[in-house]
């Protein structure tokens, strides 16, 4: 017999989110969402006041990467909701499970009232998996549907628009819960063909993406690659699904031209390509159709059917990554692979392409931080030239050890993501990497970092330029325009917000600043001043 409970409609939503593992919500309140905030707090979900809704969403994402529970973004009617549009679009493209709670004017009132009245569902329809307008008598079902849709298949954001009077309406409702589907693997003739291909493969390679992270398939991937001698490449957000120190790991791909010059020919020399949860939304145009499935055996294991057309495969399995690999391995006898040492040579070539022991510059900054911070450090990266270099240099030892916006590639994400990471994992060291332009977008959240406590470290590369854009501009022999801005004292800004601040211009100064940051009682901003054109030849 179903359990019947009597609560406010907003309480049914909050209760379901708590059941899903959510313990934090982020945003800026307005009168239209006060009941939602009250319901979240009463359910055991702490509401964190942020300085901008876009940053709030990235903090929520940072928490999600540690807890696995959907991120929660709260935005009030009109400007509050719209402020969060970018981070919701980012969640949609970066496959982030997110519940967006918005307040809206009651439907009857909206017919005679125009102030801040807009159709939130229509506005967000293109960047969410689903949108709902909360109905009091269906509040529990809507909440359960929202969690299911946000987390099933390829994850993404779901919006629940809550009319003011609906949030407060008290109703008696039966509690219904969807039972999640069990992880499954394909069987039949196609699986038999896949096993035959694996059995005869002498040069297999695996591409790993976000679906494998969502499937928590790291153990199965490692076992499979070790058993069959399969070197693997990850997307940037799948880094660390198997520790990158593993001898079969060829690191992250998809964005660095230097890395791609090594990785693409290696893939094209394979006789079996396994796409293990490989979602190509992170990849650039150079990875489009890099193989011909008529000429090489390609097996695609994905959470959803291929509608992207970035690549094609001869065998397509819409299934759980780990379970499919276990099934594929059954009865197949391993054989020697890459007998001429091509995989080891590619790994050595990648190491040589991104040396970390050079003079002062962005590579040296990353090298010093990686050396100084423990292996357990959690990191976030903003968009820009430093992200490409960081994603090649920064070695990850666990999934989600380096988080970033790699599908939408939105600027200003690293600092709020790091704040979320530290909130969810207060005992773990946390460091973020930002360009100075991205940092300028979000510096107000340093006050949030100070209010929440903890000692995250915010590294800012200071060159007073949009370096990646300037590099592209220069490579096309265009006039330099729109890429320069003022040089600012970020260390002083950090101190003004109640943190520690250091400006560094050498490895020695950076080493000293990092040692102080590790034992600091508050956050630390480290402004690493680098030269103009410091990224030339590094990417």
Image (cartoon, grey):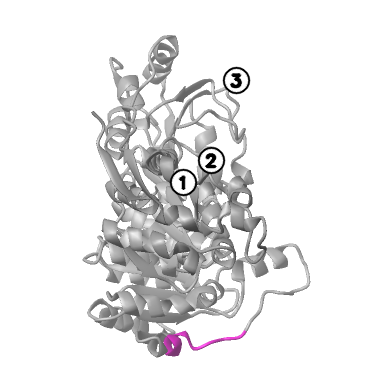
Residue identifier under label 3: 294
Name the residue: 34% across, 83% down.
508
Tell me what residue is drawn at x 36 percent, y 68 percent: 48
Q: Is residue 85 left or right of residue 49?
A: right
Residue 474, position in %: x, y? 71, 68
Tell me which residue sits at (28%, 71%) in the image: 372
* Residue carrying label 1: 235
**Foreground residue, 7 or 291?**
7
Estimate the x, y position of residue 326 in percent, counting from the top left: 30, 25
CA distance for labels 3 and 1: 24 Å
Q: Quadrant of residue 506?
A: bottom left
In the visual, does 71 lie left or right of 375?
right
Q: Are marks 2 and 1 in contact (CB under 8 Å)?
A: yes
How many residues crowd around disc 3 within 10 Å: few (fewer than 14), some, or many (20 or more)? few
Specify which label sits upstream in the sequence, 2 or 3.
Answer: 2
Residue 337 as seen in the image, left or right of residue 259? left
Q: Is residue 342 above or below residue 38?
A: above
Element at badge 2?
A: helix
Segment tinted magenta in the rendering: 486-493
Res. 235 in view: yes
């Amino acid at each position: 017999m179903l359990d019947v409970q009597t609560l406010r409609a907003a309480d049914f939503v909050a209760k379901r989110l708590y059941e899903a593992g959510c313990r934090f919500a982020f945003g800026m309140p307005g009168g239209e969402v006060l009941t939602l905030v009250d319901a979240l707090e009463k359910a055991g979900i702490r509401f964190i006041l942020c300085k901008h809704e876009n940053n709030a969403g990235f903090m929520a994402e940072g928490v999600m990467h540690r807890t696995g529970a959907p991120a929660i973004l709260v935005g009030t009617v009109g400007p509050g909701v719209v402020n969060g549009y970018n981070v919701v679009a980012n969640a949609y493209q970066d496959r982030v499970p997110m519940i967006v709670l918005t307040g809206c004017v009651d439907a009857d009132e909206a017919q005679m009232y125009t102030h801040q009245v807009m159709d939130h569902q229509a506005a967000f329809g293109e960047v969410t998996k689903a949108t709902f307008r909360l109905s009091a008598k269906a509040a529990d079902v809507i909440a359960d549907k929202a969690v299911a849709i946000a987390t099933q298949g390829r994850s993404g954001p779901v919006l629940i628009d809550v009319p003011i009077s609906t949030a407060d309406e008290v109703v008696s409702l039966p509690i219904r819960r969807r039972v999640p589907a069990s992880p499954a693997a394909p069987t039949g003739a196609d699986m038999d063909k896949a096993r035959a291909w694996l059995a005869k493969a002498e040069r297999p390679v695996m591409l790993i993406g976000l679906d494998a992270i969502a499937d928590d398939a790291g153990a199965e991937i490692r076992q499979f690659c070790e058993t069959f001698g399969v070197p693997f490449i990850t997307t940037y957000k799948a880094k660390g699904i198997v520790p990158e120190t593993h001898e079969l790991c060829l690191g992250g791909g998809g964005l660095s031209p230097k890395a791609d010059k090594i990785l693409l020919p290696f893939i094209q020399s394979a006789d079996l390509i396994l796409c293990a949860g490989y979602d190509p939304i992170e990849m650039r145009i150079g990875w489009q159709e890099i193989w011909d499935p008529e000429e090489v055996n390609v097996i695609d294991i994905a959470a959803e059917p291929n509608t992207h057309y970035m690549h094609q495969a001869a065998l397509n399995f819409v299934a759980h990554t780990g379970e499919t690999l276990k099934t594929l391995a059954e009865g197949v006898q391993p054989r020697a692979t890459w007998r001429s040492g091509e995989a080891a040579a590619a790994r050595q070539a990648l190491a040589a392409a991104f040396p970390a022991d050079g003079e002062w510059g962005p590579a040296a900054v990353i090298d010093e931080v990686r050396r100084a911070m423990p292996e357990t450090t959690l990191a976030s990266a903003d968009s820009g030239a430093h992200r490409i270099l960081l994603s090649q240099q920064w070695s990850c030892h666990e999934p989600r050890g380096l988080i970033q916006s790699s599908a939408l590639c939105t600027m200003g994400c690293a600092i709020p993501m790091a704040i979320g990471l530290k909130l969810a994992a207060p005992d773990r060291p946390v460091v973020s990497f930002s360009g100075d332009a991205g940092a300028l977008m979000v510096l107000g959240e340093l006050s949030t970092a100070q209010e929440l406590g903890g000692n995250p470290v915010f590294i800012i590369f200071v060159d007073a330029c949009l370096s990646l854009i300037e590099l592209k501009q220069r490579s096309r022999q265009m006039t330099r325009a729109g890429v320069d801005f003022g040089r600012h004292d970020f260390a002083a800004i950090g101190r003004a917000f109640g943190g520690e601040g250091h400006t560094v211009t050498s490895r020695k100064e950076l080493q000293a600043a990092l040692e102080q940051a590790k034992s600091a009682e508050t956050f630390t901003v480290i402004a690493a001043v680098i030269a103009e054109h410091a990224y030339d030849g590094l990417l």
